[in-house]
Image: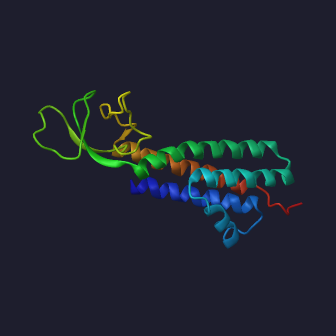
Amino acid sequence: MGYALTRWEWLEIELCGLFCVFTDKPRASQTAIEAYSSGATFITRADRLRESSRDYAIFRHDQTKEGQFLSLLCKARTMSERRNDIAHGMVAYYYGPTGHPMLTGYVVGLPEGGDLTFCLTSPLYDKRRIAFGLSGQLLDFQPEYVYVAEQIRAYGDDFTALTHEIISYEVSLEPRNAP
C-alpha cells in the first residue's frame, strides 16, 4: 500500500508543478504551492488546476495542448478513486477457492481446500461502499472492491506511468512570458 500511495504523492507533486506553470509562478513558489494544496480533496485541487489551465490556454491559444491536459486530468481523476480505495481500505484475510471468497478479520477453523492471503477491501462502516436492504438492515457484506498485493502494486505502477506523462506534458509547455 505504501508503494502505491507514495507513487500517488509523486503524481500530485507533478500536478502542482503544472499549476505553477499555468499560474506563471516558479515551480517552488510558496504562493502557488499553497494555492494548489489548499484544497482538502483531490477533486478540489483538480478543479483548481483545471481553472488555472483555462487562464494559461487564453495566452497560448493551443487547443491540442489543452486537449492533452484535459485527457491527463481525466486520467488523474479516475485514478484518484483507486488511490482513495487504497488509502481508506482495510486489510482483511481473504480465504477461499476461486469464486468463493470469505473476508474475515480473524482466522479460526477455516475449512480445508482454500488459500489464505491478505487483501485490501472496502470498510464495512463506509455507507458509500456497502448495501442495505429495504428494511434498513445490512445485506450480506459484499465489498465494493477486494485488492490483493499484485493489484495494488499495479495501481502504483499506473500512477507512475501517469506521472511520467504529466512530466512530458509539462516539459512541452511554453512559459506564459515566452514570445
Task: Give the residue at x 65% y 61%.
Answer: 36
Query: How far across and how far down the image is residue 73, in percent?
Result: 64, 46
Q: Is 87 above or below relative to 150? A: below
Residue at image position (71%, 50%) is 50
Using residue 133 as the reference point, say whether residue 63 is left or right of it: right
The reply, left or right, for residue 50 in relation to residue 144 is: right
Please state which of residues 107 and 63 is positioned toward the viewer in this rendering: 107
Of all residues, the one furthest to the right in this rendering is 179
Label count reads 0
Classify 59 as above or below 123.
Answer: below
Q: Nearer the viewer, residue 99 or 43?
A: 43
Q: Residue at x 80, y 61 (%)?
A: 175
Looking at the rendering, in which quadrant would you find the C terminus?
A: bottom right
Q: Nearer the viewer, residue 48 or 152?
A: 48
Q: Is residue 177 left or right of residue 117?
A: right
- Where does residue 124 sit, x and y in percent of width and height? 34, 43
Residue 158 in sight = yes
Q: Residue at (66%, 71%) from the top-left corner?
A: 28
Residue 29 visible, this orientation: no
Q: Quadrant of residue 127?
A: top left
The colouring scheme, among rainbow, by chain, secondary structure or one colour, is: rainbow
Residue at the extreme front: 135
Where residue 25 sits: x, y (%)? 75, 67
